[in-house]
Amino acid sequence: MDRIYKDADTLIKRSIEANLPGSAVRKALKARTFSGKLSVVSIGKAAWTMAQAAHEELKDRVKTGIVITKYGHSRGAIPGMEIIEAGHPLPDENTIKGTEKALALAETLGAGDELLFLISGGGSALFEKPLPGINMADIVDVNSQLLASGADIVEINMIRKRLSGVKGGRFAQACAPARVFTVVLSDVLGDRLDSIASGPAAPDMSTAEDALAVVKKYKLKLKDSVKDHLSKETPKKLDNVEAEITGSVRTLCTSAANIAGELGYTPYILCSDMNGEARETGLLMAAIARQINKRLAKQASGSYTPARPCAIILGGETIVRLKGTGKGGRNQEIALAAAEGIAGIDNLVVFSIGSDGTDGPTDAAGGIVDGFTAARLKAKGLKPEDILDNNDAYNGLKAVDGLLITGPTGTNVNDVAVILAL
């Protein structure tokens, strides 16, 4: 088992390294000519890395800049840029402070000026200014309800953008008549610009009717002032914006497949649009692992089962329905949910990891289990099913050394889950 854990560690580290946004940002900027006064605003979990790359490429061409990222994700000063760390997944006072500074910068822009807007996942929580009649407590309450409901990221952002003075294209409006060039690191399935960080510089593709349907679907309890804003429309056209997407979960999956191949595994990308409940995804991965363990080349149905050594790769973003009071994240739930189903299988691991290095409100990036994880838990008097029912995957995996901890990585292109079988 030592080798397969070593290979898993190598696969994780190298896949993340291959998707750091620095080189992609520099490439996007090399192909771009800026003629007016140039300012920078960078938001999201990868905001520091993207801003640093912009500084390295543009140097003193940038006159001023604001960087807003998650606590612990800054790696030091960047010349000419003010760095503000704020709350995620829920916004806080620093979120408002940083956003107000970005809006103040936008007010100084005029015709002929240009703004380089660097966007990465996490920007929805990190870039926020409530609309009149709504306060930060209202925003936090709505976000908390959405995160606990099991709503997907597109549904969540339909609500968020209608309560915000910067989301849903409103920040780009605030920058007009200046031109806005956005470089985007996507953490949203399908790379929808209006959903990544709730689309602060993108026309909104959703409608007020869509947003109200989400409220009804998840039975959200909202104040009248919040409901009033949800019934109003967001900008549907922006004439001062250009955008370029530099990375996504598809590139993460491709990187993982290439690296697995170099390590001696036959790689198979099962999908790059994984969604649904984390627990169900873990059960699915366990079922696939059991088929692999049978070493069948051909099933009666005609479906093909890969032979060992192989790596089965899924990319995307699942959801967690909060029922318990424990601690964890979607990637930890995927791994733990697979543990019982792969019990007794040797030389096989299942792991799932968030590319940004943080999974839910924890210091872990994800989790890893093998054929003996369930037995180790039971030896400690712990049952995987009970742990999952309490949404306590973090403490369950911690008890058996199943947490994956990378620290902030500097990128954010969604999650990757892998079955690695020797």
Image: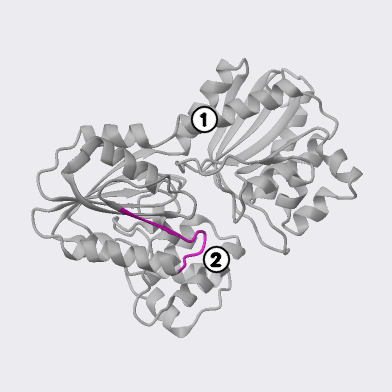
Q: What element carries label 2?
A: helix
| Circle 2: residue type | Leu
Determine contact: label 1, label 2, CB under 8 Å. no
Q: Name the residue under label 1.
A: 15
Q: Looking at the rendering, which quadrant does residue 307 occupy?
A: top right
The total of numbered circles placed on residues is 2
Cα–Cα gap, marks 1 and 2? 30 Å
196 vs 263: above or below: below
Quadrant of the snapshot with the C terminus: top right
| Residue sitting nearer the eye, 216 or 45 | 45
Badge 2: how crowded within 10 Å, few (<14), some, or many (20+)?
many
Q: What kind of colouring is applied to the model shown? A: one colour
Q: In this view, does 132 lie above or below 5?
A: below
Note whether residue 170 is visible. Answer: no
Query: Quarter of the image containing the N terminus?
Result: top right
Q: Residue 146 carries which label?
A: 2
Circle 1: residue type: Ser
Q: Give the range drawn in magenta.
A: 82-92
